[in-house]
Amino acid sequence: MTDTTGLILASASPRRRELLQQIGVKFRIEVADIDETPLSAEHPAAYVARLALGKAQKIAAENPGCVVLGSDTTVVLDDEILGKPENADDAARMLAALAGRRHQVMTAVALVKDDQQRVQTVITNVHFAPLSAAQISAYVATGEPADKAGAYGIQGLGAVLVDAIEGSYSNVVGLPLTETAAMLQQFDIPIWDKD
């Protein structure tokens, strides 16, 4: 018999797991493996919404009656999607492009239960401090950029790269909590659940 209680997180992201735990949501994890290649001329907001919904739909199809949360985050500079870097050189290229400039972090959150679905995309403006080549090399050498969209983690060592943000901090980490909590409540998934 399928367990139809609670929430399934369709993500392997440790940051999303920690953020959901932070607001007291009970969930289990089932990772959705989907093609994350952007479509030709696809707008970044449409891209993250498509991936978030695709992840949630894939796991929901395997778990009838369950509420599934899919999410995707990308960094956008001048309408260019900056995904996870391919290697250290790619990370350094991204960081040099972001240095001293403003970019957007877009996170889409999708909830799916059977034929019900909701998707919301949240955008936060992030201002990077100017960075020297030596700073970029030193940060890349820490290894932190390797699995992060845009090659940085605001919640980690990369916090010193960020001069200011406009909008949701948790969105930049990987899950906008205010919006996610409101969506979860629409699907009768409690927050602040300490039982």
Image (spheres, grey):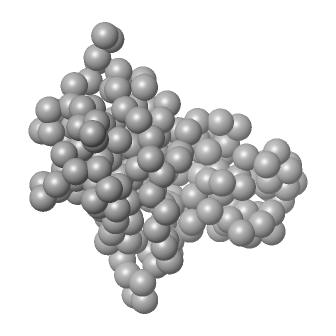
Spot occupied by residue 168 in the image (x, y as percentages of width and height): 37, 40
Q: Quadrant of the N terminus?
A: top left
Q: Residue farthest to the top?
A: 195
Spot occupied by residue 165 in the image (x, y as percentages of width and height): 46, 43
Closest to the observer, 148 or 159: 148
Determine the image quadrant of residue 41: bottom left
Determine the image quadrant of residue 23: top left
Spot occupied by residue 2 in the image (x, y as percentages of width and height): 28, 41
The residue lying at 56 percent from left, 68 percent from top is 82
Is 54 drawn above or below residue 79 in the view shown? above
Could you tell me if residue 164 is visible in this image? no
Is 101 drawn above or below residue 178 in the view shown? below
The residue lying at 35 percent from left, 26 percent from top is 26
Could you tell me if residue 74 is visible in this image? yes
The residue lying at 73 percent from left, 63 percent from top is 91
The residue lying at 57 percent from left, 66 percent from top is 83
